[in-house]
């Protein structure tokens, strides 16, 4: 399903800084791989801004995210994670989700995430929801249970027709991140969603810088010209990023070092937005 046999697993494990020892298709391995992946590979959509195609074949994603140490957005991140987990021996299924972080607007299904079944229990796995993504899998068989991951807390609640919603606490209440149905999605479905997300003029990823990372002590997002830092206590810090600081900030905050040509093109487009 996920072309795990095409993945250079050793290179992937080196990229995520794997130090978890022997790989087994069990829950400790799943948690460790998920945490290592989300810690090492930044969420970013700079290729969309630069007008370049986002390829979803496993070897193309491996070349970009593993060998050239770039980041990617949900279709790339979770296709890579799915290929690795499949290669290790996990049962992996795709899902499509509706973003609910923008108020009451009903948005189309555009987010890709995974469900991994371990010893008969399904777990939400997602390396691609930007700075708000869980660092570790979240159980799906116990809706309403609060799951603490270091300083951060998540829970899944159930709605009608089997729809599940991933939630986080904000300002004294639970807020929805996204909702998904039990319908399995396949890699070919992500190709269609990726086409819209990377090219439609109404896509949030078209025409602006989006780079994010879910850190343990602070979750950081650069959207447009604004850098936002979400702290575990709920405080939010914001600052505008001037053009002459952009490339250094991408390296310092997100571990992204672009080739000289790409950096120059990104700066040109960034300055054009003034």
Image (tube, rainbow, N blue to C red):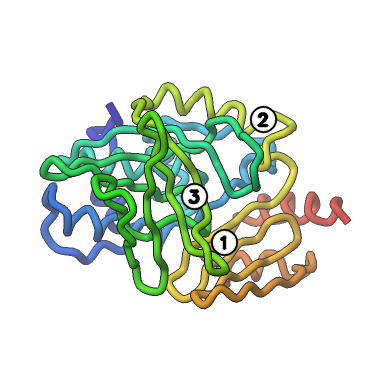
Tag 3 residue: 129
Furthest toward the right, the residue is 274
Q: Which label sits in the foreground, 1 or 2?
A: 2
Q: Position of residue 30 (x, y in %)?
A: 22, 53
Q: Residue at x 49, y 59 (%)?
A: 174
- Asked if marks 1 and 3 touch (Cβ < 8 Å), the reply is no
Label 1 or label 3, whichever comes before in sequence order: 3
Q: Which mark is residue 199?
A: 2
Q: Residues within 10 Å of mark 3 (few under 14, many from 20)?
A: many
Q: Which mark is residue 257?
A: 1
Instruction: State the separation of the CA atoms marked 1 and 3.
Output: 21 Å
Q: Residue at x 62, y 42 (%)?
A: 47
Q: 173 or 274: nearer the eye?
A: 173
Label 1 or label 2, whichever comes before in sequence order: 2
Instruction: State the separation of the CA atoms marked 1 and 2.
Output: 25 Å
Q: Residue at x 34, y 40 (%)?
A: 114
Q: 257 or 86: nearer the eye?
A: 86
Q: 1 or 130: nearer the eye?
A: 130
Q: Which mark is residue 105?
A: none
Indicate the secondary structure of the residue bearing disc 1: loop
Indicate the secondary structure of the residue bearing disc 3: loop
Q: Residue at x 74, y 42 (%)?
A: 207
In the rendered structure, the answer to whether residue 52 lies left or right of residue 24 reads right
Q: In the image, is residue 31 above or below residue 118?
A: below
Q: Quadrant of the N terminus?
A: top left
Instruction: State the separation of the CA atoms marked 2 and 3.
Output: 19 Å
Q: 135 or 187: nearer the eye?
A: 135
Furthest toward the front, the residue is 160
Total labels: the figure holds: 3
């Amino acid at each position: 399903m996920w072309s795990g046999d095409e993945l250079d697993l050793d290179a992937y494990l080196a990229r995520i800084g794997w130090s978890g020892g022997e790989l087994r298709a069990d829950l400790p391995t799943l948690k460790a791989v998920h945490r290592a992946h989300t810690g090492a590979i930044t969420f970013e959509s700079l290729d969309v801004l630069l007008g370049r195609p986002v390829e979803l074949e496993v070897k193309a994603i491996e070349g970009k995210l593993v060998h050239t140490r770039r980041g990617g957005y949900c279709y790339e991140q979770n296709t890579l994670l799915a290929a690795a987990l499949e290669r290790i021996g996990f049962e992996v299924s795709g899902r499509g989700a509706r973003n609910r972080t923008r108020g009451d607007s009903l948005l189309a299904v555009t987010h890709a995430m995974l469900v991994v079944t371990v010893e008969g229990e399904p777990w939400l796995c997602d390396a691609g929801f930007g700075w708000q993504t869980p660092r570790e899998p979240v159980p799906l068989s116990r809706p309403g249970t609060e799951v603490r991951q270091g300083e951060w807390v998540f829970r899944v609640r159930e709605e009608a027709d089997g729809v599940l919603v991933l939630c986080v606490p904000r300002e004294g209440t639970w807020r929805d991140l996204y909702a998904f149905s039990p319908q399995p999605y396949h890699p070919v479905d992500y190709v269609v969603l990726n086409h819209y997300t990377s090219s439609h003029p109404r896509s949030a990823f078209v025409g602006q810088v989006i780079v994010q990372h879910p850190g343990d002590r602070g979750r950081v997002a650069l959207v447009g010209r604004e850098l936002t830092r979400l702290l575990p206590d709920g405080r939010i810090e914001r600052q505008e990023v001037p053009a002459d600081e952009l490339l250094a900030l991408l390296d310092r905050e997100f571990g992204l070092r672009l080739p000289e040509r790409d950096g120059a093109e990104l700066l040109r487009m960034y300055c054009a937005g003034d």
